[in-house]
Image: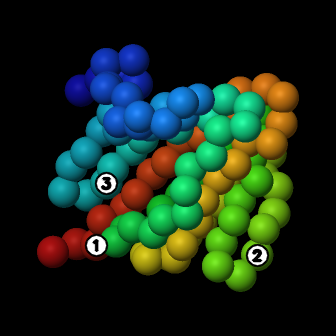
Amino acid sequence: MVFKVSDAQNLSKEPGLERRKFYESDKAIVAQIVLEPGAHLKKHGSEEFALIYIISGSIEVETDTETYEAQEGTLLEFQPKEQHGFINKGDTTAKVLVVRIKEPK
């Protein structure tokens, strides 16, 4: 099977923010988030273990305990229900790949 980000609907209504979930199975969810300069994704948590890979640009990451910058080529790990949010404080578009891994049932 082939899955394309371009085939997925933008799930965001926020200006400057795109969230496109382009794969989902009983094992994982894969999505792409695009943040234009100044855009932010509000702090949230999910039921799944999450890996976040910065494809391009940089983002400021906010958790309940810290705030830090993550640049292109960085992989972030979040445990289930761990709160995290992103802000693009740069002057270029940031692109992020999200992989959420579901617990076996």
Q: Quadrant of residue 101?
A: bottom left
Determine which residue is flagged by label 1.
Answer: 103
Q: CA distance from mark 2 to mark 1?
A: 26 Å
Task: Please report whichever mark, 3 or 1, sits nearer to the chain's N-terminal start.
Answer: 3
Residue at horizontal 44 percent and vertical 77 percent from the top: 81
Q: Secondary structure at mark 3?
A: strand
Q: Is residue 72 left or right of residue 54?
A: right
Residue 83, position as x, y percentages in the image: 54, 72
Q: Is residue 83 left or right of residue 28?
A: right
Of all residues, the one furthest to the bottom in this rendering is: 65
Q: CA distance from mark 2 to mark 3?
A: 27 Å
Residue 43, position as x, y percentages in the image: 55, 63
Using the image, determine if residue 4 lies above or below residue 26.
above
| In contact (CB < 8 Å): disc 2 and disc 1 | no
Residue 66 - label: 2
Task: Please report whichever mark, 2 or 1, sits nearer to the chain's N-terminal start.
Answer: 2
- Count of numbered circles on the image: 3
Q: Is residue 91 visible?
A: yes
User: For the residues carrying marks 2 and 1, which lies nearer the camera in this image?
Assistant: 2
